[in-house]
Image (cartoon, grey):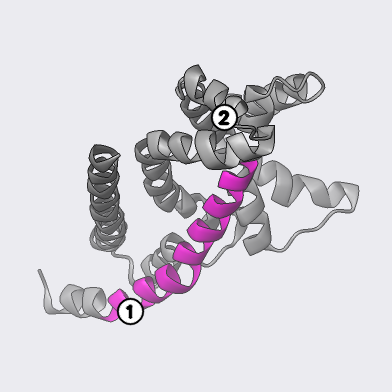
Amino acid sequence: MSERLASILIDSIPKILVPGLITTIPLTILAFSLALVIAVICAVALYAKVSWAKPIIRFYVWIVRGTPLLVQLYVIFYGLPSLGIILPPFPCAVLVFALNEGAYCTETMRSALEAVPAGQIEAGWCVGMSYSQIMRRIVLPQAFRTAFPPLSNSLIGMVKDTSLAANITVMEMFMATQRIVARTYEPLALYIEVAIVYLLFSTILTAVQRYGEKKLSAYNRIK
């Protein structure tokens, strides 16, 4: 490694980390939180067999899961302005990532809800609970415990997917790296460097996931 390359890599670390901390992480948190809201609403509607909502939700899941995330970003950011709808890059990225991840998490939550034993729901009816109380106190807590590992995997995947937001001019880690590459002409070293930063973020989230799974396992043993 030449002295010039070492200097470029050292100098680029804060220029990559700062966009990661102020853009990539907030983008991930906001989008995933909204995705969970979408997923819970859709999954509960499917679980409750709401007749009018089922075809709408199925259509939404079919469209989102059947088209590339990058195409969805382009349609919303570059396509909607032709209809007079203009969204700033960051809110657009939050919306698209939330809708995309919400479709996948809907299926995760649906399967988790269906894994709750029917006998526990019947027990809720027997003690005089309303349907909303049964969902809040019995079904949803158990469903979230079941869905925790796959939802955690989805969150880790979203951290990496945020790199696609560079295509709609969001100044996140990957776009910051692209600009450094354009100035220095050192693509291999710099792209490896940003890959290591993504790996670091994913490793931290993986450690949090394992900690959460251990806590849930201990709680289940106590129960």
Q: Callout 2, which amino acid?
A: Gly
Q: Is residue 24 visible?
A: yes
User: Which secondary structure, mark 1?
Assistant: helix
Q: Could you tell whether 67 is left or right of 108 in the image?
A: right
At 75% from the left and 59% from the top, the residue drawn is 87
User: Which secondary structure, mark 2?
Assistant: helix
Give the mark nearer the N terminus: 2 vs 1.
1
Q: Nearer the viewer, residue 32 or 43?
A: 43
- Give the image quarter of residue 189: bottom left
Q: Nearer the viewer, residue 174 or 152?
A: 152
Residue indicated by mark 2: 124
Which label lies toward us, 2 or 1? 2
At 67% from the left and 55% from the top, the residue drawn is 92
13 falls in the magenta region: yes
The answer to whether the residue labelled 2 contacts the one labelled 1, judged by CB atoms less than 8 Å apart, is no
The span shown in magenta is 11-39
- Which part of the image, by quadrant, shows the N terminus? bottom left
* Image spot of residue 83 (x, y percent): 89, 47
* Image spot of residue 151 (x, y percent): 42, 40
Q: How many marks?
A: 2
Q: Could you tell whether 130 is left or right of 25 in the image?
A: right
Q: Is residue 103 above or below residue 62?
A: below
Residue indicated by mark 1: 14
> Which numbered tag is attached to residue 175?
none
Q: Is residue 163 above or below residue 41?
A: below
